[in-house]
Image (spheres, grey):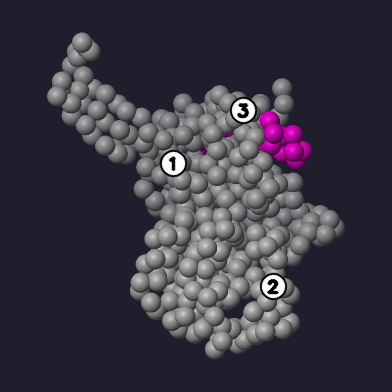
Amino acid sequence: MSEVREKAQLAKQTAAVLGKLTTNEKNKALLEMADALIARASDIMEANAEDLRRGKENGTSSSLLDRLALNEERILGIAEGLRQIVELPDPIGDTLETIERPNGLHIVKKRVPLGVIGIIYEARPNVTVDAAGLCLKTGNAVVLRGGSSALSSNRKIVEVLHEAMERTALPAASLQLIEDANRSSVDEMLKLNGLLDVIIPRGGSSLIQNVVMNSTVPVIETGAGICHTYIDESAQPDMAAAISLNAKVQRPSVCNAMETLLVHEAFAKSHLHSLAEAFKERNVELRGCARTLSYAPWAREASSEDYATEYNDYVLNVKIVDDLDQALAHIAEYGTKHSECIVTENGQNAERFLQEVDAAAVYHNASTRFTDGFEFGFGAEIGISTQKLHARGPMGLPALTSSKYVIIGSGQIRE
């Protein structure tokens, strides 16, 4: 039996136990896991150093190495994410709806776990802990398949979490890590109907599309983040600069970072040159339309392919538009339904943007970097869904549940 199938079976066997655990038992386990991460931080960083060394040898980009890197501060943050989950309400068992039928039937719709969740992701070892915490809090077993670039880190993290779980009511087998780094292990996961109830991919567009196109297991799609900021004619210059710089350079390697800046031609005439200089000072490579080059002659001319690219790096497309309609059209063509922002003092334009842009998160006068489970008050997130079925946007605990109807009768039969 393959490693993938064996570990999925082990995870599924814990489903009955997970369903019986109380919120208190689950929370105690998560706190034990958080403490263990901090206690073993040096061991985790040592394993992470192996991944970083291998990544550098393989020519991995600096932005991807940043996503991979762990230090004491980041490990403390990851542990804090687990503690945040403990503080959140447990949705399992919540009553969603109550129906009283004329025949006396009492029908209650309740939240229940999804079951066994498979998560396929790339070079961010923090996802290993975030995913485990969110899935286990909601009574779901989880099968993780991280990228080969983070294998040493993920292996050590799961080892630490398993040791902590052994001291709690939470079965260690409910958390599984696939260590087979071959693509065939991903392909096998996609066909584990009956063992996995849902698959959630997290990563670049090629990974996500492979899962969406080839999985026979239901998928919650977390899309790529080609995010836009549109600076309207009436935008306050200081606010526009602060928001757009934050959206790009605060952490360019993440999916809610801005990839294209759209600028109204009137704003561009007065302020684009100074804004372009600010990006240049922060080592951002600009790629712009022909009109942009007149304000930033050092920029490279952007192509259609550039506008369709999620860089996750210090590269930014800039396009000057005549009006809001052109900005909306550009976003409709190139956006990935992730996060989109308008900076404006025009209330009518803001309302149009918020209503007409089709995305999981739309912003007025705030950075797209806030599309995040922690920032939304959900604690750690399992991902940011860009689809429209079941869950959309940052997915916290409720997104990892399903529902069932509980019907109480007194002998009713259907005529």
Rendered location of residue 293, percent (x, y): 68, 80
Report the front residue among 181 and 314: 314
Residue type for callout 1:
His
Give the image quarter of residue 346.
Answer: bottom left
**Residue that carries the numbered disc 1 in the rendered image:** 390
Amino acid of disc 2:
Arg
Q: Nearer the viewer, residue 135 or 290?
A: 290
Q: Which mark is residue 269?
A: none
Q: Position of residue 326 (x, y in %)?
A: 52, 68
Residue drawn at (41%, 44%), measured in percent from left and top?
398
> Mark 3 and mark 1: span between their CA atoms?
21 Å
Location of residue 365 in the rendering, given as x and y in whole percent from the top left corner? 44, 73
Q: Earlier in the sequence, mark 1 or mark 2?
A: 2
With respect to residue 190, does 336 lie above or below? below
Q: Residues within 10 Å of mark 1 (few under 14, many from 20)?
A: few
Secondary structure beneath dot 3 equals: loop
For marks 3 and 1 on the same chain, the one whose residue lies earlier in the sequence: 3
Q: Label 2: which residue?
A: 287
Q: Is residue 189 above or below residue 83?
A: above
Mark closer to the chain start, 2 or 3:
3
Camera-near label (1 vs 2) is: 2
Disc 2/disc 3 C-alpha distance (Å):
43 Å
Is residue 173 found inside the magenta-colored segment of the image?
yes
**Relative height, residue 255 to residue 12 (above, below):** below
Q: Residue at x 66, y 27 (%)?
A: 5
CA gap, disc 1 to disc 2? 37 Å
Q: Nearer the viewer, mark 2 or mark 3?
A: 2
Q: Which residue lies under the disc numbered 3?
A: 192
